[in-house]
Amino acid sequence: MPFAIPPTIAWTDSTITLAWLKTEPYRWQPFVANRVSKIQTTIPSVEWCHVSGIENPADLGTRGLLPSQLVAHDQWIHGPLWLNQPMNETSSYKIPETFSFPDNALKEKRSVVTCVAKIVPLSEFIDRISSFTKLVRVCAWILRFIKIAIHQSQELLVT
């Protein structure tokens, strides 16, 4: 008989995080996209719920409580009172399908990079460098840049 895994419920007090988790990771900058992707692949069937910042026991440690006060704090030990109540479809902590996220939560974050190049004759380029050693170093940096750029563009084509 296979072991039945009970439904998993995860909590956050961030509505922006909830918005990120409801969308595809590729829409976000790499920092957010990597974390959203990791969460979505690690716990794909999780049900995300919202807890207000005031009721979030994890926030108690950031509100200036001493460790001795934190250990004795009922909310830190047991969580919010409503957490022990039976869950139902109309619970206030569940995210309704019609929930509207803050305007800035779902804005796609994209960057535009512009590169301007000027073709300089080789003789003029060499004349600008003050020593042969510096010329060798500059050429090495250029070749290294080209190699890395080619490698990264090939990786993008593969994925």
Image (tube, rainbow, N blue to C red):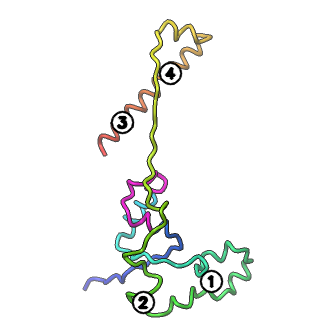
Residue at x-position 37% and y-position 31%:
150
Indicate which disc residue 76 carries: 1
Q: Earlier in the sequence, mark 2 or mark 3?
A: 2
Residue at x-position 62% and y-position 75%:
59
Q: Amino acid at mark 4?
A: Ala
Indicate which disc residue 87 carries: 2
Which of pointers 4 and 2 indicates the residue nearer the eye?
2
Q: Disc 4 marks which residue?
A: 140
Label 2: which secondary element: loop
Residue nearest the observer in this picture, 99 or 152: 99
- Magenta part of the chain: 19-33
Please name the predominant secondary structure of the magenta segment in the image. helix
Label 3: which secondary element: helix
**Where does residue 145 sit, x and y in percent of width and height?**
46, 28
**Distance from label 2 to label 3 (Cα)?**
50 Å
Which of pointers 2 and 1 indicates the residue nearer the eye?
2
Which of pointers 4 and 3 indicates the residue nearer the eye?
3
Q: Amino acid at mark 2?
A: Met
Label 4: which secondary element: helix
* Residue at the far bottom in the pictured view: 85
Bin the neighbour count of mark 3 within 10 Å (Cα to Cα): few under 14, some 14-19, many 20 and up. Answer: few
Bin the neighbour count of mark 4 within 10 Å (Cα to Cα): few under 14, some 14-19, many 20 and up. Answer: few
Which of pointers 2 and 3 indicates the residue nearer the eye?
2
Look at the image and say whether residue 20 sits in the magenta stretch: yes
Q: Amino acid at mark 1?
A: Trp
**Distance from label 4 to label 2 (Cα)?**
64 Å
Which of pointers 1 and 4 indicates the residue nearer the eye?
1
Q: Disc 3 marks which residue?
A: 153
Does 138 sit left or right of 22 as displayed?
right
Total numbered badges shown on the rendered structure: 4
Bin the neighbour count of mark 2 within 10 Å (Cα to Cα): few under 14, some 14-19, many 20 and up. Answer: few
